[in-house]
Every structure is written in structure tokens, then in C-alpha cells.
Image: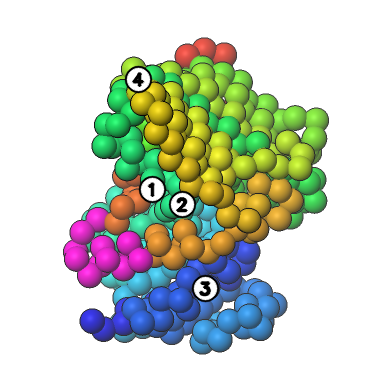
Amino acid sequence: MARRRFGIIGLGMAATPHAKSLIELEQRVEVVAAYSPTPARRKAFADKFSFPLVETPGAIFGDSSIEAIAILTPPNTHLDLVRSAAKAGKHILLEKPLEASTDRAMEVVRLCRHAQVKLAVVLQHRYKPAAIKLREALQSGILGRILSCSAAMRLWRPQTYYEQPGRGTRARDGGGVLLTQGIHTLDLMMNLAGPVNEVRGYATTSVMHRMETEDLVVAAAKFANGAFGTIEATTAAYPGFPERIEIACQKGGAVLSGSGLSILRMDGQVVEVAPDNSPGGAGADPMAFPNDYHRALIEDFLDAIDQNREPAINGAEALRVHRLIDALLDAGALGKTIAVRQ
């Protein structure tokens, strides 16, 4: 099968795990152009990776041989870039979130559907081996009906993190801990336990940070399947702790902690997945994680192109977590139970 020709737009912090994954997938992918509007960033990227650089995004959009584009830029730039890519007939691998607001996110999805190009969203936590093992156990029925599912994202980001231009602002990022960090765990939580129907809780900016948006959210949730749970998300928990999802079922329970997993069944059987040695981006270095999950997501994106099917994490999937985040923020602002738009 011919190698797919790729372009990359955005060469900042998020580009590294993508670049490493694309190199590891060189039998299926050839990166022929990489672009950043900042010359210094292009040089820094070129010092690490040998992909050809271009000086305008038009060099990527206008190259008919390029079949797919990885868009790895700040959230508020996604819509315009997706519009250009979709118009040019390029399949799109898009860093989370879809956009800085749900309305703009919906337009991103609409544009890709109208142009009939594949859209894959980088919510790579679904590809953790421990998450895959837990998903298989839940789907098999060995744990029975889910009674409760709770997710905790107790991360640490120093104030210097939020002093980078635009970070943690509504204009560039669209939000704080939920849309920038928590989106991964919330997406995985719903992938395991199903959609959330309603939430009630609190959202605030703690004394630990000077920033425009929220860095601390606590809420109760009711799932569509009747299960209940709690959601906690913060970047004010020093020194940062692994992502944690706890699920209680009729026939046992499970704890997903970082890259590790414990499934404890009432019949005495135990399933364990040992964690790796990565801090998982929970602490001050947000990029301290392996690129394995990115590589698996990109492989699915390539398979979707080859097989003419939807990527596993497509636009519709990503919109679910955007709408949950909207409801959590509304619940925090209004002090009442909020239905999650489906």
C-alpha cells in the first residue's frame, strides 16, 4: 500500500509526540512539509526532526500530493485552518480541543462532513493499554452493570505555565483545566461508562493561579445508563497525580490510575496492568509521557483513510466531551443542575 503524504501545521509543544509517531510509522506515512508561522519555532523543530519545512501554510494546502494534514496549533486557530484544509480535500488529524468554543467546534465538524474528508481528534488516552483492557472487560459483561463511575484529574501546573501568551484565556484556549487538560479524562470516562445526562457542581479559579479561566472543578454526574459519579479536575494539585477513573459494577470494580489498571471481580479473579514509568504529564512538564498512544491514534486515522470509514475518535465523538464541559462550566456558574446537550 502506498505511503500517505502528510503535512504538519503547528510546530510547538504538541508537535513532538506526533513527529515521533510519524517517524515510527514511516512505512505508512511520508511527512513532506511542516510549517510554523514563527521562524524560531521552525528552526527549533528542524534541530530535532528532519522533515522538510515550508514558509507558508499555502504550500501545504496547495500541494495536491499531500493527502492529510496534522493541525497542531492553538484552539482558536483551528476553524480557519480546517476550512482551508477541507476545501483542499485534505484529511485532518486535529489536536484537541476541536475549537475554542462549541459553536466553532460544530462548524469544524460540519465543514469536514460537507467536504467528505476524514476528521480524527487527538484524544489519545483511549489508546492506553490499560484503558483498552478495561473497555474490553466492561463490554464483555464480566463486571455486570455499571453502578458508578468517577474521574479525577489532579494535576499541577506552576504559574509560569499560565504566563505564556494566551494560555488559559478564553480567546485563545477557550477555557482552563477542563478544555485544555481534563478533556482527555472526560472523553475516556464517557468512552468507558457512556454519555453523561446531567451534572451539578462548582467551577472556580483557585488561589494558586492568576488566570482568566477555571483551574478547579468539582461536580456530581448522572450517566445515561443510570449510573452516578463524581468529576474532579484541577491544575492546582502539587506535585500532580495520575489520572484516575474508578468504576463500581454489579460483579466487581476497577481502578484505572495513570497507565496502570486493577480489575477486582467478586468471583476472586484479578486483572492487573502494571503502570509504566512515565509521569504522564501530571506535573510541571505537561509533555512527560510516551508517544505510544499518539501512534496508535494515528494508525487508526490511517486505517480510516485506507478503509474509507470514520476514525474511532471523530468529530461527533469529540463534540460529546465539548458539550459535557459546557454543562460543567454552566453548573459551576449557575449553581444548579444542568442537562448535557446530546
Residue that lies at the very extreme toward the front in this rendered image: 268
**10 Å neighbourhood of mark 3: few (<14), some, or many (≥20)?**
many
Report the predominant secondary structure element of the magenta stretch. helix
Residue under numbered circle 1:
132
Q: Which mark is residue 250?
A: 4
Residues at marks 3 and 2, CA–CA distance in whole angstroms: 19 Å
Q: Residue 321: x, y in percent? A: 43, 38
Q: Which mark is residue 128?
A: 2
Residues at marks 2 and 4, CA–CA distance in whole angstroms: 25 Å
Indicate which disc, 3 or 1, sits on the residue closer to the N terminus.
3
Q: Is residue 178 visible?
A: no
Residue under numbered circle 3:
19
Q: Quadrant of the N terminus?
A: bottom left
Give the amino acid type for the residue marked by disc 4 in the picture. Gln
**10 Å neighbourhood of mark 1: few (<14), some, or many (≥20)?**
few
**10 Å neighbourhood of mark 4: few (<14), some, or many (≥20)?**
some
Give the amino acid type for the residue marked by disc 3 in the picture. Ala
Q: Is residue 209 above or below residue 283?
A: above
Q: Does the magenta segment cover residue 129?
A: no
Do the residues bearing badges 3 and 1 touch, measured as CB atoms within 8 Å? no
